[in-house]
């Protein structure tokens, strides 16, 4: 048997560079700040970092609007800082994934500037330009993300409309034009040559479009087009991108953001092992803290991905979504969710700050800066309990609540902290092939609980998560029969950790059990 690839057993840690650590004192995090905090990641025990965009950008979408894919925005540092960061990560055994944004550029990117300059410019066709509809309105009924507005903007200078699935300042690239694909391949080579281990690929399902640009059906009219765009053209582009990555040594990989809210559709983006290595699967991200909902997500994920050999991913928080502690309603639940996330079969992706049990910041209306209103989950990471929490000047967004206790320094000093729970879990995960890459089977458990067994050869672990706010007794269940005499290896509330499992789960408690 060949060993699983590194990305199957890895724990990925997402860094939103603006909010991680400020090395130069301008109130915005940067690459030198990240470099100075790598020991936190090593001590935590993650395997790879994914850096959200740090490229040159007018920051209308905080870096997801790129004006130069092959340079670092001055607010984040320089290419030399990037190279030093990659070297430091690799020296510590951390892999580096960078964000690739292929669907659109900034409207200030030289490509779009050229494209919009004239109907006859050779780069006109690098973007989607169309005449208006018969009524003089947009060419079709597609709606942009973050707004109820059309995904088209009229450009008076040349009398045509251009397509943007996101902001008007984020025109969609036309991947049907081979020059666009070649240019994006050059971008990919640029970063691979600098030593990155792979890419998280932004809205990758958006790049292929129906060349007829037909209206979205009436039953979904008014919803953003992005989660509806699911096209065969994209798979052709992904296979060529995969071939490019495969031409490099060292297991370079791509983790795609396929924002289709249907796991069966997501599965197709792994291709026949010749497209994405990994894809996000967002339905679980939006599932409530409820046993029946999570059981369904776990079953659906296995049913759709396992038969086609697609390795799952799991994520509870990111820079676009309210943090899971805020969504689930308590730190006890967020801690149980950590054992859920890290105990499931697949590659978990952590979002910086979740290891501290952070809540979303409450951002007053006058400080909201994101067009999608996602500021709360992008609050700066508190590094210590002091007034500035390790930030040399006031950061660009307010700190999350409870930063006087929920900060890196205090949580490292406290064995009861959420941070220490993540550390202990990652130690246990690293030591167990069953937890990292083992098979998974759901167990019969009482209502309110989800439980499963992970198996790799002789190595076995059982994960039990009590989603209810009551004590649950497992007496008489398959789960208890399967774990007679087993030990509690990790408990989300530390209750019983290191002792023989009693057969009872506390309210919102999760445990990892190992043979005694
Ligand atoms: O943010 C969302 C819901 O609040 C999603 O619909 C989001 O638009 C989708 O996940 C795509 O997100 C990615 O591309 C966007 C960028 O704004 C997001 O930050 C990024 O994660 C456009 O580049």
Image (tube, rainbow, N blue to C red):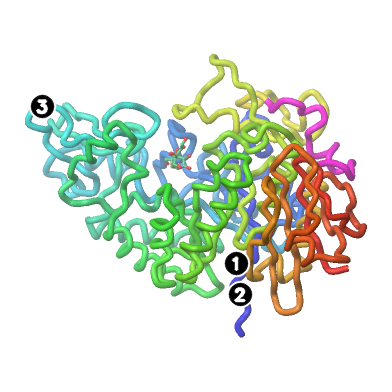
> In the image, 7: left or right of 477?
left
> What range is drawn magenta here?
399-417
- CA gap between label 1 and label 2 equals 6 Å
Q: Quadrant of ligand 1?
A: top left
Callout 1 crowding tier (Cα within 10 Å): few <14, some 14–19, many ≥20: some
Total of numbered circles in the picture? 3
Q: Is residue 413 magenta?
A: yes
- Residue position marked by numbered label 3 in the rendering: 136
Q: Secondary structure at mark 3?
A: loop
Residue at 26% x, 30% y is 150
Q: Quadrant of the C terminus?
A: bottom right
- CA gap between label 1 and label 3 equals 51 Å
Tell me residue 189's x, y (percent): 43, 63
- Residue position marked by numbered label 2 in the rendering: 4
Q: Is residue 346 magenta?
A: no
- To which quarter of the image does residue 145 belong? top left
User: Of callouts 1 and 3, which one flags the residue occurring earlier in the amino acid sequence?
Assistant: 1
Circles 1, 2 touching at the beta carbon (< 8 Å): yes
Q: Secondary structure at mark 2?
A: loop
């Amino acid at each position: 048997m060949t060993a699983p690839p590194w990305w199957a057993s890895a724990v990925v840690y997402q860094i939103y560079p603006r909010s991680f650590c400020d090395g130069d004192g301008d109130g915005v995090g940067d690459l030198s700040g990240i470099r100075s905090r790598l020991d936190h990641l090593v001590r935590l025990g993650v395997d790879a970092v994914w850096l959200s965009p740090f490229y040159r950008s007018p920051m209308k979408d905080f870096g997801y609007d790129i004006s130069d894919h092959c340079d670092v925005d001055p607010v984040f540092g320089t290419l030399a800082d990037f190279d030093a960061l990659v070297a430091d990560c690799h020296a510590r055994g951390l892999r580096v994934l960078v964000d690739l944004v292929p669907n659109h550029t900034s409207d200030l990117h030289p490509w779009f500037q050229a494209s919009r300059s004239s109907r006859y410019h050779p780069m006109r066709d690098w973007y989607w330009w169309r005449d208006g509809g018969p009524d003089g309105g947009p060419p079709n009924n597609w709606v942009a993300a973050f707004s109820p507005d059309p995904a088209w903007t009229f450009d008076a200078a040349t009398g045509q409309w251009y397509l943007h699935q996101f902001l008007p300042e984020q025109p969609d690239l036309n991947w049907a034009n081979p020059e666009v694909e070649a240019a994006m391949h050059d971008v990919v080579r640029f970063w691979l040559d600098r030593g990155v281990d792979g890419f998280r690929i932004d809205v990758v399902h958006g790049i292929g479009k129906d060349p007829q640009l037909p209206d979205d059906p009436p039953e979904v009219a008014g919803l953003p087009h992005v989660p509806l765009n699911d096209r065969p053209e994209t798979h052709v582009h992904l296979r060529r991108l995969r071939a490019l990555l495969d031409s490099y040594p060292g297991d370079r990989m791509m983790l795609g953001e396929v924002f289709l809210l249907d796991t069966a559709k997501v599965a197709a983006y792994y291709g026949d092992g010749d497209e994405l290595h990994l894809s996000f699967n967002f339905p679980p991200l939006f599932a409530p803290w409820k046993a029946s909902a999570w059981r369904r997500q776990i079953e659906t994920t296995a049913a759709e991905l396992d038969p086609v050999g697609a390795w799952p991913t799991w994520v509870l928080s990111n820079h676009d979504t309210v943090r899971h502690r805020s969504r689930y309603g308590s730190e006890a639940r967020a801690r149980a969710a950590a054992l859920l996330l890290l105990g499931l079969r697949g590659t978990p992706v952590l979002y910086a700050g979740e290891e501290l049990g952070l809540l979303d910041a409450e951002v007053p209306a006058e400080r909201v800066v994101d067009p999608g209103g996602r500021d709360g989950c992008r609050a700066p990471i508190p590094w210590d309990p002091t007034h500035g929490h390790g930030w040399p000047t006031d950061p660009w967004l307010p700190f999350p609540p409870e930063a006087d206790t929920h900060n890196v320094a205090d949580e490292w000093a406290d064995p009861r902290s959420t941070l220490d729970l993540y550390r202990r879990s990652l130690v246990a995960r690293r030591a167990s092939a069953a937890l990292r890459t083992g098979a998974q089977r759901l167990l019969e458990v009482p209502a309110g609980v989800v439980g499963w067994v992970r198996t790799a050869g002789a190595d076995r672990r059982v994960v039990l998560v009590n989603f209810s706010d009551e004590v649950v007794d497992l007496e008489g269940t398959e789960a208890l029969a399967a774990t007679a005499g087993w030990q509690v290896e990790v408990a989300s509330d530390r209750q019983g950790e290191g002792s023989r499992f009693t057969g009872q789960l506390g309210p919102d408690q999760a445990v990892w059990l190992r043979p005694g």
